[in-house]
């Protein structure tokens, strides 16, 4: 009996050892090595290396909710709310010719999924759709360009898009083109020149439209300098189709607890770059009340809005803009503007406009 038990126990032990050795012989496949995203600090914060490359990428954008008010903001309504979203991609890497950059920003505006009366409105028995109240669309490229060293080509905002602090001034007419540009930044001073496609930029001269249905070329150039807290930028543009040009200057200076800015424009006549008046002057003061609160009063005057036409009326505009940084990445901006226009028949018209905006940047 003892011998039998010993033999059975030995066999069981041998089977267990054999099974263990057989299990040990099966080797699981090792996972492939992973390349983790690396931070790229060569071009500022927020960039990371695209895995497997030496190209640095930054993803950003914003979500904006805004309510605007004033005459006819949405049809006959004196107010209108909308939401805008943007996502942008900024890719850069160093080359022997300088930094190679590509940038693209997508935007979409949204108001309502369907119009407030539904999709089957009728007029005189004919169904139609109220496009004004359906705005889940308007998806577009806000900017897209390639940049190498100081050269830049693509669809982007021109220097005419830049203005002074606040939300009161008018600083240009069409401000975004398909362009080829060169920028030089020497630190203390800077300069640039661009060749712009002026595509169907109709410019009315009071009786006729210029450039109607034609693509033309425009040339814009800028020069500026910075010294301490003072900046001066001078900009000029010539519209080949209208055969007219405009010149603009912006002076900015740190003064007390804020920044004072003055803008001046003169134009030979209406062009794609400027068509608001023969001349204009504007000023604003961005008062830094606290680290989070900025209050900016501003004003602008437009002289000879009909240019060389007899009895050309003028316009003036005043406004106040308030910006508040609620938390990091979330800001409030509100503005109210009053505008008064002279009319040829005598008298004037006036309007009060503005908006309230909440924007989350990332």
Image (spheres, rainbow, N blue to C red):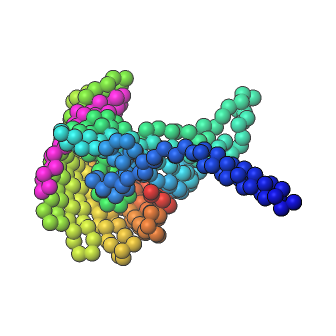
> As displayed, is residue 235 above or below residue 270?
below
Quarter of the image for the C terminus: give it. Answer: bottom left
Q: Decide whether residue 86 is among the magenta residues.
A: no
Q: Which residues are magenta?
A: 177-204
Residue 153 left/right relative to 130: left
* Residue 22 vertical position relative to residue 2 in the rendered view, above or below: above
Residue pictured at 26% horizontal, 40% vertical: 100
The structure residue drawn at horizontal position 34% and vertical position 41%, both measured from the top left corner, is: 53
* Numbered disc total: 0
In the rendered view, tell whether residue 197 sits above or below residue 55: above
Q: Quadrant of the N terminus?
A: bottom right
Q: Is residue 133 left or right of residue 127?
A: left
The quadrant holding residue 91 is: top left
Residue 352 coordinates in the image, percent (x, y): 46, 58
Residue at far right of view: 1
Residue shown at the point (56%, 53%) measured from the top left:
81
The answer to whether residue 347 of the structure is visible from this angle is no
Across and down, in percent, residue 187 comes to 14, 55
Residue 336: x percent and y percent? 44, 62
Magenta span main SS: strand
Q: Position of residue 322 (x, y in %)?
A: 41, 67
Q: Quadrant of residue 257?
A: bottom left
């Amino acid at each position: 009996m003892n011998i039998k038990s010993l033999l059975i126990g030995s066999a069981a032990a041998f089977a267990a050892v054999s099974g263990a050795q057989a299990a040990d012989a099966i080797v699981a496949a090792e996972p492939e090595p992973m390349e983790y995203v690396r931070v790229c600090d060569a071009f500022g914060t927020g960039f990371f290396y695209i895995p497997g490359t030496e190209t640095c990428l930054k993803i950003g954008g914003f979500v904006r909710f805004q309510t605007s008010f004033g005459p006819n903001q949405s049809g006959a309504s004196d107010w209108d709310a909308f939401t805008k979203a943007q996502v942008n991609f900024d890719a850069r890497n160093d080359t022997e010719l300088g930094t190679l950059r590509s940038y693209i920003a997508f935007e979409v505006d949204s108001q309502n999924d369907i119009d407030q009366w539904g999709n089957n409105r009728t007029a005189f028995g004919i169904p139609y759709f109220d496009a004004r109240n359906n705005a889940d669309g308007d998806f577009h490229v806000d900017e897209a360009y390639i940049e190498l060293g100081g050269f830049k080509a693509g669809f982007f905002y021109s220097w005419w898009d830049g203005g002074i602090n606040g939300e009161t001034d008018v600083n240009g007419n069409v401000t975004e083109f398909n362009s080829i540009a060169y920028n030089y930044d020497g630190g203390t001073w800077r300069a640039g020149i661009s060749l712009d496609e002026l595509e169907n930029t109709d410019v009315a001269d009071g009786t006729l439209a210029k450039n109607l249905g034609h693509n033309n070329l425009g040339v814009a150039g800028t020069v500026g300098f910075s010294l301490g807290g003072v900046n001066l930028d001078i900009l000029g543009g010539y519209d080949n189709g209208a055969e007219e040009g405009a010149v603009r200057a912006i002076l900015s200076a740190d003064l007390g607890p804020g920044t004072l800015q003055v803008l001046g424009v003169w134009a030979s006549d209406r062009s794609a770059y400027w068509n608001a008046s023969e001349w204009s002057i504007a000023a604003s003061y961005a008062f830094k009340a606290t680290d989070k609160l900025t209050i900016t009063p501003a004003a602008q005057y437009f002289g000879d809005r009909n240019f060389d036409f007899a009895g050309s009326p003028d316009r003036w505009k005043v406004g106040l803009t308030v910006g508040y940084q609620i938390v990091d990445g979330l800001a409030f901006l509100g503005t109210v503007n009053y505008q008064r226009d002279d009319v040829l028949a005598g008298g004037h018209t006036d309007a009060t406009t503005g908006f309230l905006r909440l924007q989350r940047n990332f």
